[in-house]
Each structure stands twice: as structure tokens, then as C-alpha cells.
């Protein structure tokens, strides 16, 4: 609502209250029917203020009406005794209606705001996804041409270093674009009932080189008789790989990182634990936000993708303290034994 609009609405409400009050005070007391009609008219500004300004607006209107109308009732108290209590009741009613209507209208407004936020987020997501889709093709072309030119250069050509930088930067952008795509596109899960062991092994294989650079030992721990359950293998691998890469990144030289899996009742639990620097409790929500990162040159999209995939499976992710040091990322997926 613009300031001008708000002023106009305040003016209309005040004018209505003033107008009805004027009628009350200028009409003879014996014209009871007219007074009853004016009492009804007082509801109008209360309702309007409630719709326009919520609880406080409605209360401002009903309290003003009470303050203006009270002297009228008191000065004529006892003149037509039957009406006195009705007048008081009606004033209580103005304020009651104001409170109820105000609360309802505030609640409705909050709902609308949430909806608008969600809609604009969805629109931004869609725009990002179009943009990323377009960039992906162009970046792939730049990278491809860069590699092909590099292949034609002599090994000692000084341009080789610059070309390498172009290729590396393009790769980084490609990775960013892929992560934005994974994050902004609605996921179409392709679910099938299968065992988790091969996926964990694939993920460990994927992270092995990175772990070797820091001499980090990768361990897997799961019972051999894990029952199969329904999940999207590519997406869940993406989840485990993202968690593993983060865990290795947080680890010191010679540390170990562990992946474990177990069925717990109606849930399937996958945990990735490390002995790294840990995540302070107050940061444990923030790390899941897109683009939140404490690493140089990182995208900060990894954990937001993890959470999206897990949520789309109907599961949840939590961060727990590891025994001595570091954190455990616990992924709980629904296990349906059908
Ligand atoms: N296992 C972990 N130990 C400590 N900090 C972590 C761990 N995993 C994630 N984080 C923190 O969360 C941030 C966000 O992670 P992520 O979304 O994967 O983005 P990125 O890895 O690109 O920074 C990281 O930058 C890091 O600060
Ligand atoms: Mg990451």
C-alpha cells in the first residue's frame, strides 16, 4: 500500500467515525430507531480498518468509537434506561469484532506474503535455470576449443600457461553451472528398489584421489545384509559424494573419514563422519543455504543440493557432533519394505 493510499484509507475511516458520531450527537434521543441504525453503522469503519490495517488498525477504530460514543451514553444515562446497557454491550462488541477481525486479517496477510515470497523464489529459480542451461552449452564450447588449441601448441609455448588458465576457469564455471542446474531444476527422481552398498562403493571410489592428496583414509561400515530400498541411484550418489568431499576438505592430513549405513525401523540412515574442524551449532542451518561457503573458489551449493535431493526423497539431513572432533552428517531416508 502506498503512503498516499494509506492516508486516503485513514481519512475514510476517520470520516466515517466522525460522520456517524455527528449523527448520534445531533439526533434527538427519542429517535431510538435512528440511534440503533447509527450504532450498526459504527461497524463499518471497524471492518474497513481491520481489512486495511489489521489488528492495530481495527483496535484504533474501535477504541476511538468507544471514546467518542461513551460520553453520549453517559450524559444520557438513565433517560431511556433500557437502552443504556445495550449501548455498553454494543461498545464491547465493537472492540471484540475489531480484535477477531484484526487477528484474522493479519493472519491472512502473513499467508499472502509467504505465498508471494515462494512465488518470487520459484521465479528466480526458473530464471537461474534458463540462464544456466544456456551457459552450459557455451561454456562447453569454450572449454572444447581451448583444449583443442592447446593440443596444437608446442609444449614450451608461453601461451600454454594462459590457455591452461582459460581451460581451468571454464571448468570451474561449468561446475558452477551444473550445480545451479541441479539446485534450481525441479528434480525428477527415478526411483528403483536396490541395495545401497554399490552406491557407497562408487562414491568412495570417486573421492579416493582427493582423499589420497591429504592421505585421508576412507572407511566404509555397513552390515552385509542391508535390505534394498527405493531411491534414485544417481542422486543419492551425488549426496554421498558431496558429503565425502566436504568431509575430506575439513580433515587434516592423515585423518580418516567414514561412511556408514544402517536400517533403523522405518528409516534408512546414511552417515558421513569426519574428525575435521567441525561446524559450530549456530552455523548448522546456514551451511545448507545456497552459495554459503567458507572455501576459496567454492560454489557453496553442495549442501543445498544434498538437502534438496534428500528432501525430495521424503528424508531429512542433520548435523551431529562426532565423538571427539568433527561432525557427522546424518541422512535419514524413508525405508518402505513393500
Ligand atoms: N564436514 C564439514 N566440516 C566442516 N565444515 C563443513 C563440512 N561440510 C560443510 N562444511 C561447511 O559448509 C560450507 C558449505 O558447504 P557446501 O554447501 O558443500 O559448499 P562448498 O563445499 O562449496 O563450500 C563449507 O564451505 C564449509 O564451511
Ligand atoms: Mg561442498
Image (cartoon, helix red, strand yellow):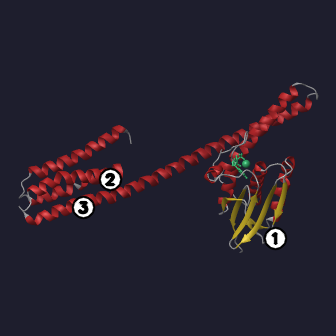
- Whether residue 250 is visible here, answered yes or no, is yes
SS category of the residue bearing label 1: loop
The residue beneath circle 1 is 223
Residue at figure coordinates x 16%, y 61% from the top left: 87
The residue beneath circle 2 is 50
Crowding at dot 1, Cα within 10 Å, few <14 / some 14-19 / many 20+, comes out as few
The location of residue 25, given as percent across then percent down, is 11, 50
Q: For the residues marked 3 and 1, what is the alpha-carbon distance in whole angstroms?
A: 68 Å
> Disc 1 vs disc 2: Cβ atoms closer than 8 Å?
no
The quadrant in which the C terminus is found is bottom right
From the viewer's perspective, is residue 73 above or below residue 2?
below
> Disc 3 vs disc 2: Cβ atoms closer than 8 Å?
no
Q: For the residues marked 3 and 2, what is the alpha-carbon distance in whole angstroms?
A: 14 Å
- Please give the label number shown on residue 93: 3
Is residue 42 or residue 93 the one in the foreground? 93
Q: For the residues marked 1 and 2, what is the alpha-carbon distance in whole angstroms?
A: 62 Å
Q: Earlier in the sequence, mark 3 or mark 2?
A: 2
Q: Earlier in the sequence, mark 1 or mark 2?
A: 2
Crowding at dot 3, Cα within 10 Å, few <14 / some 14-19 / many 20+, comes out as some
Amino acid at each position: 500500500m502506498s503512503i498516499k493510499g494509506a492516508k486516503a484509507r485513514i481519512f475514510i475511516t476517520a470520516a466515517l467515525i466522525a460522520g456517524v458520531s455527528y449523527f448520534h450527537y445531533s439526533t434527538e434521543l427519542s429517535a431510538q430507531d435512528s440511534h440503533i441504525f447509527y450504532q450498526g453503522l459504527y461497524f463499518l469503519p471497524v471492518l474497513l480498518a481491520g481489512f486495511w490495517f489489521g489488528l492495530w488498525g481495527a483496535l484504533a477504530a474501535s477504541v476511538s468509537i468507544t471514546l467518542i460514543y461513551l460520553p453520549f451514553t453517559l450524559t444520557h444515562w438513565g433517560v431511556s434506561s433500557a437502552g443504556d446497557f445495550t449501548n455498553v454491550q454494543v461498545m464491547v462488541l465493537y472492540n471484540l469484532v475489531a480484535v477477531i477481525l484484526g487477528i484474522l486479517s493479519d493472519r491472512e496477510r502473513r499467508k499472502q506474503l509467504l505465498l508471494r515470497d515462494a512465488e518470487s523464489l520459484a521465479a528466480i529459480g526458473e530464471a537461474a535455470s534458463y540462464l544456466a542451461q544456456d551457459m552450459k552449452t557455451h561454456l562447453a564450447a569454450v572449454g572444447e576449443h581451448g583444449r583443442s588449441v592447446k593440443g596444437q601448441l608446442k609444449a614450451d609455448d608461453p601461451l600454454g600457461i594462459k590457455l591452461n588458465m582459460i581451460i581451468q576457469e571454464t571448468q570451474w564455471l561449468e561446475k558452477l553451472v551444473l550445480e545451479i542446474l541441479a539446485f534450481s531444476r525441479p528434480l525428477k527422481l527415478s526411483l528403483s528398489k536396490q541395495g545401497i552398498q554399490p552406491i557407497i562403493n562408487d562414491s568412495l571410489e570417486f573421492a579416493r584421489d582427493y582423499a589420497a592428496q591429504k592421505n585421508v583414509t576412507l572407511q566404509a561400515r555397513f552390515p552385509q545384509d542391508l535390505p534394498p530400498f527405493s531411491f534414485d541411484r544417481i542422486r543419492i550418489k551425488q549426496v554421498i559424494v558431496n558429503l565425502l568431499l566436504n568431509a575430506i576438505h575439513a580433515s587434516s592430513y592423515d585423518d580418516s573419514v567414514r561412511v556408514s549405513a544402517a536400517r533403523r525401523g522405518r528409516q534408512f540412515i546414511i552417515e558421513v563422519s569426519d574428525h575435521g574442524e567441525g561446524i559450530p551449532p549456530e552455523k548448522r542451518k546456514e551451511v545448507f543455504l545456497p552459495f554459503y561457503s567458507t572455501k576459496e573458489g567454492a560454489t557453496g551449493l553442495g549442501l543445498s543440493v544434498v538437502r534438496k535431493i534428500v528432501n525430495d526423497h521424503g528424508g531429512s539431513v542433520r548435523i551431529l557432533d562426532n565423538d571427539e572432533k568433527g561432525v557427522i552428517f546424518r541422512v535419514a531416508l524413508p525405508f518402505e519394505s513393500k
